[in-house]
Image (cartoon, grey):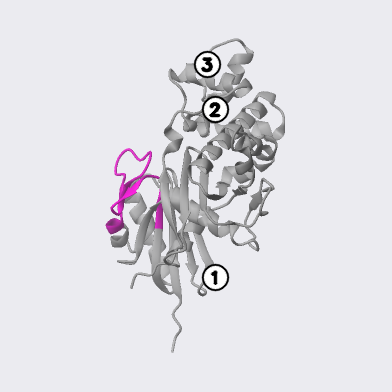
Amino acid sequence: MRFVKDIVVAIDVGATNTRARVAEVTGAGQSPLVLSDFETQVGSATELGAVVSRVASGAALLGKVASAVVAVAGPVAEGGSSVTNWHVDAAVTVGRLERAGLPAGRTSLVNDVVAGAWGALARIQSPGSDQFVELLTDPAVGGPSLGGGTVVYIAPGTGLGAACLIRHGMGALGASAVGCEAQHTTASRFEGDMARAADAVADSLGRAPSWEDMVSGRGLGRIYSALRASAAAETPGPDDDAKGARAIAELALAGTDPVAVEAVFIYYRTLGYFAQMLALAYLPCAAVVIGGASTEHNITLLRSSGLAGAFTDNDRLSGLLSRIPLYVVGGEVNLEGGLWLATRDERP
C-alpha cells in the first residue's frame, strides 16, 4: 500500500511580492517539513490565480493537499479581501482560491499581519529553532519564558501593521487573533529630537502625523528629509521623502551618513513607543514581538537605537513594562504562521 503524504500550503500575498511554501505534515505538535519555496511578483487577483494554480499543482504531486492558508495584505471579512495597493482586480476570495486549485472547504484567508503573529508566537515558543529570534529586554520578573496573557505582534516595513493573539487555551489554536489599526491614529507628542522630527514631518504633511506616517518606509524617508532640512534651516516639502528607506538604512549601517543614523534611531524609538501603547492596551501582556525581514537586516541599528528604552519609558507604568519580554524575529514569519494554522485545521 502506497503511503500518501499530507501536504499543507501557505501563501503570503503582498502588495508586490507573493511567496508560497509547501510542507509535509510530520506529526501532531511538530513543525511541518518544508519541501519547497516559491516567490514571484503579483499585481492582481488574476495573476494571483495563475500563481495559486501553479503552486497547487506542484503540491498535489507531492501528496494529498490537506489544507491551505493564504495571507493577504488587506483586511479580511467573510472570506474575502481587497489587497492593499492593488488598484484594479484587487478582490481575493476563498472561492477564487479554491477554483484555482487549493482544497475546497479547507482553504482559509487571513490578514498577513495576523499570520505573522501566529508565526512569531510559534518562533518564540520553539527555542531550538534555527530561525532568527532575539530577546531585546531582560524582564525583571519571570525571566524570558512566555507567561500567561496576550502576545502583541508588530510588523514595520513598507507600512506598519499590528495584531494581537488573545491566549485563552481553548480549541485547536489556544488563542484568538485580534486585528489592529492603531497605526493610523495620531502619534504621541514627543520631546527633544523626536519632537523636532515629528514637527517637521507634520509641516510637510500639513497635519499631525500618524504612527504609520513615522514608522514605515515613507516614514523613514520623511524623518531623514526633515533632519536634513532642519540642519539646513529649511522646511521639507511634500515630496522630500523620496530617498528610499532601504538606501537610508544602508547609509546608516555603513556609518557614512550621521543624519541617516539619527533618522533610523528616531524611527525605531518611535516604534518603541508604539509598542508600549499596544502592550498597555492588551493587558495582561505576555510578550511583544517585532518582526519582519527588514527588522532582522537592521538588527544592529535597532539594538543601538534606544527602542527598548522607549518601550519602558513611562512615568507610571515603567515597572510593569519592564516585566514584559520584548522580542525581535526575522525571516518569513507570515509563511510560518500560515503553515502553523494549516496544520491545525480541524475541519472534517
Instruction: Judge whether residue 19 can be spotted in this image.
Output: no
Q: Residue at x 52, y 41 (%)?
A: 280
Residue located farthest toward the top when viewing the structure as drawn: 233
Residue located farthest toward the right when viewing the structure as drawn: 255
Image quarter of residue 320: top right
Q: Which mark is residue 173?
A: none
**Residue annotated with mark 2:** 221
Separation of residues labelled 2 and 3 (CA atoms)? 11 Å
Please state which amino acid type lies under the numbered disc 2: Gly
Instruction: Judge whether residue 347 can be spotted in this image.
Output: yes
Where residue 314 sits: x, y (%)? 60, 33
Where residue 295 sits: x, y (%)? 59, 43
**Residue annotated with mark 3:** 236
**Residue annotated with mark 1:** 30
For label 3, the SS is: loop
Q: Nearer the viewer, mark 1 or mark 3?
A: 1
Q: Are the two marked residues, 2 and 1, in contact with CB atoms closer than 8 angstroms?
A: no
Image quarter of residue 83: top left
Separation of residues labelled 1 and 3 (CA atoms)? 52 Å
For label 2, the SS is: helix
On the rendered structure, is 194 left or right of 50? right
Q: Residue at x 46, y 36 (%)?
A: 183
46 lies above or below 129: above
Is residue 256 or residue 228 the one in the foreground?
A: 228
For label 1, the SS is: loop
Q: What range of the chain is rendered magenta?
A: 70-96
Looking at the image, tell me whether mark 1 or mark 3 is earlier in sequence order: 1
The C terminus is located in which quarter? bottom left
